[in-house]
RNA sequence: GGCCCCGUAGCUCAGGGGAUAGAGCGACAGCCUUCUAAGCUGUUGGUCGCAGGUUCGAAUCCUGCCGGGGUCGCCA
């Protein structure tokens, strides 16, 4: 179904048939021989680089090799034209019959077209993992969408994917949260409160306070923190996670696993952070030593002391890392190591974490840790997401860091809709900063990529509505469409659309391989552009229109092509988690 | 200072070993008594930050600089 892979096989078989060998008679390495779509349509449908790659090992002239290969390939009945061009490219043009047969296969395959056919390994994608201390901030949005789309993409490419959220419910932050909620509890009991600096002031804790007051009455009033902290913390975190899940659901993000950091120490398996450290110690990667003070600004409370260090430099980190704080508790890194060890033990050799760019300095040590706890068997890839800047009609949206004045994820989704948020978050490489304009993303114009792509899908549906009205005799089911005379699709716009469709499987594969879901968004934009462009040509040239009542046979063939476009648009949008509407409203 | 990311058209960005580097916006010029729903077509515009290196071939890979951002033990 991937025509580039198909002809790649044919080219390699042809080379074998020609008996090509290296200059010394040894077999050739054909791994660099590829069949690709040429950038310029004037160069045909397929470009073969074999002659250039093999010229040196064979000790021959590349153009002469290309001509020899061309002579053999010209006998292929699916190839209409061949030419040798440039430094030794062999360009191929396919017959209308081949394109028609290809299209029939796409329509028959439907939404499975482009889906990975060979099973690939299990992958764990961890994303969002926001602290459970408040509602989702717009800053979490990009990582959530990128992670979710990447997970969808990997699944589509054939991986067994688990979407995971690591709840940071241990450590000082959640104690602060609990104290903040306790204040709201006192408030609910009628006390007048002032929220000190450093605690969470947001209104979202008021309902929690009310619930606590209703549930526990005076029991936690005027009592030492030690009596209520655990209870309040647990209740508050639970409530926060309910809120966060709802926020994520509004963004069409659903995780398979929510993993509690705290459970690493309090679960039935005992202290698994200690166990992870022991694993590193058994591997000879722990030692007692001192660290150099950090360069740049020296922390005020820096003290030079002997401590237990993880030899992360053995796995590529810059310096060795402490796993214990001076008070004896574990660092966040220690917990994270235990967590990634858990993922490894659950069978994930391929792990992906999605982080904000401000955590970039943490990547090396985490990769080192994953290497260390798996004896080098598991690997971690970290995708860093850059900041999103918010605009409204070109003007930056001011976001005060003060309490409660931040833009929540829910604010954004409610205003512009989940589709616009998701698509725009993916219409940029994740490691590049992103501008998000509330006004622009809801515009109904070609300048708005979300609209442009969704409209393309709606337009395909519209074409079928017209076809049913104008040509009621045509069988527009998939089974009927593949019986159309598809070899009639010979116009450059039609060939162009089929060539774009043909690239879908390789785009999926490359994007999955590179962990870059944005490539799907850009591909869909290109495909939409091809469709709209060809559609517009029909304004001046009515004979090119998809639906021509005077020419039912050609119309039938074109409708098959439109169906294929619709299917690929729908598949791609599904990977992105964006709706594929049948009409724009 | 160390490390990470980025540097491509006036602007926002694609392209991550192949041929003459692309798209949108902007600007400029036409078309739009049309019809297939929210315009269309064309033109303009680039020493791919700089300098070396690898390669038949480099915007792409490597090294070193320059510029912008991020980050730099016991925050998560």
Image (cartoon, coloured by chain):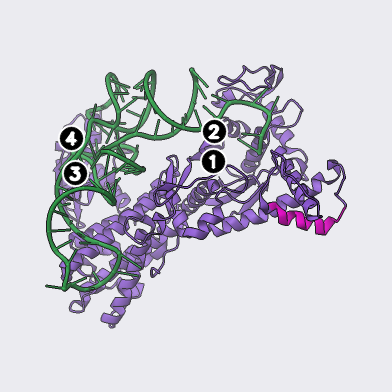
Q: Which residue is mark 4?
A: A62
Distance from label 4 to label 2 (Cα)?
Answer: 44 Å
Q: Which residue is mark 3?
A: A90
Q: Which residue is mark 2?
A: A363
Image quadrant holding the N terminus of chain A, namely bottom left
Q: Name the secondary structure under disc 4.
A: helix
Q: Residue furthest front?
A: A192
**Residue at image coords 27%, 58%:** A530
The chain drawn green is chain what?
B
Residue A123 seen in the current view: no
Q: Nearer the observer, disc 1 or disc 2?
A: 1
Which chain is disc 2 placed on? A
Q: Nearer the observer, disc 1 or disc 4?
A: 1
Residues in magenta, as a range = A205-218
Q: Which residue is mark 1?
A: A355
Which chain is disc 1 placed on? A
Which chain is disc 3 placed on? A
User: x and y percent of residue A373 in the render?
Assistant: 63, 33
Distance from label 1 to label 2 (Cα)?
Answer: 9 Å
């Amino acid at each position: 179904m991937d025509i580039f892979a198909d002809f790649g096989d044919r080219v390699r078989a042809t080379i074998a048939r020609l008996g090509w060998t290296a200059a010394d008679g040894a077999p050739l390495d054909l791994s660099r021989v590829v069949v690709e779509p040429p950038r310029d349509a004037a160069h045909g449908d397929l470009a073969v680089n074999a002659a250039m790659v093999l010229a040196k090992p064979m000790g021959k002239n590349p153009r002469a090799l290309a001509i020899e290969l061309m002579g053999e390939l010209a006998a292929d009945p699916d190839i209409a034209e061949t030419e040798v061009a440039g430094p030794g490219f062999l360009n191929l043009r396919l017959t209308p019959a081949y394109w028609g047969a290809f299209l029939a296969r796409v329509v028959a395959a439907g939404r499975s077209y482009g889906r990975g056919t060979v099973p690939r390994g299990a992958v764990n994608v961890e994303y969002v993992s926001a602290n459970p201390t408040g509602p989702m901030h717009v800053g979490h949005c990009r990582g959530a969408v990128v992670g979710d789309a990447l997970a969808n993409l990997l699944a589509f490419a054939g991986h067994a994917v688990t979407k995971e959220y690591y709840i940071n419910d241990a450590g000082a932050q959640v104690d602060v949260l609990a104290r903040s909620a306790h204040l709201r509890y006192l408030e609910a009991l009628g006390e007048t409160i002032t929220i000190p600096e450093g605690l969470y002031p947001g209104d979202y804790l008021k309902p929690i306070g009310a619930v606590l007051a209703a549930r526990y009455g005076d029991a936690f009033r005027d009592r030492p923190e030690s009596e209520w902290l655990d209870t309040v913390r647990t209740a508050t975190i639970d409530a926060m996670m309910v809120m966060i899940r709802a926020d994520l659901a509004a963004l069409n993000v659903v995780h398979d696993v929510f993993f509690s950091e705290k459970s690493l120490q309090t679960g039935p398996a005992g202290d698994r952070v200690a166990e992870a450290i022991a694993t590193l110690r058994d591997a000879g990667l722990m030692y007692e030593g001192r660290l150099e003070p950090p360069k740049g600004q020296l922390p005020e409370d820096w003290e030079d002391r002997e401590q237990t260090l993880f030899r992360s430099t053995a796995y590529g980190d810059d310096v060795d890392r402490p796993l214990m704080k001076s008070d004896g508790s574990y660092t966040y890194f220690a917990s994270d190591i235990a967590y990634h060890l858990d993922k490894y033990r659950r069978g994930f050799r391929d792990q992906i974490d999605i982080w904000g760019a401000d955590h970039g300095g943490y990547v090396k040590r985490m990769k080192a840790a994953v290497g260390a706890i798996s004896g080098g068997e598991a690997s971690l890839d970290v995708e860093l997401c850059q900041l999103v800047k918010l605009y409204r009609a070109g003007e930056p949206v001011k976001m005060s860091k003060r309490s409660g004045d931040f833009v929540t994820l829910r604010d954004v989704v409610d205003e512009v809709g989940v589709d616009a948020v998701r698509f725009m978050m993916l219409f940029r490489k994740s490691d590049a900063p992103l501008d998000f304009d509330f006004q622009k993303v809801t515009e109904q114009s070609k300048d708005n990529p979300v609209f442009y792509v969704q409209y393309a899908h709606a337009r395909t549906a519209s074409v079928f509505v017209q076809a049913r009205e104008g040509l009621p005799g045509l069988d527009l089911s998939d089974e009927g469409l593949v019986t159309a005379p598809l070899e009639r699709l010979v116009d450059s716009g039609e060939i162009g659309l089929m060539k774009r469709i043909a690239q879908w499987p390789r785009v999926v594969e490359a994007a999955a391989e590179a962990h870059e879901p944005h490539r799907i968004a850009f591909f869909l934009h290109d495909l939409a552009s091809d469709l709209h462009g060809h559609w517009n040509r029909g304004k001046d040239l009515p004979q090119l229109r998809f639906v021509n009542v005077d020419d039912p046979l050609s119309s039938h063939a074109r409708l098959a092509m439109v169906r294929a476009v619709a299917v690929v648009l729908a598949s791609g949008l599904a990977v992105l988690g964006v709706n594929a509407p049948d009409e724009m409203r």
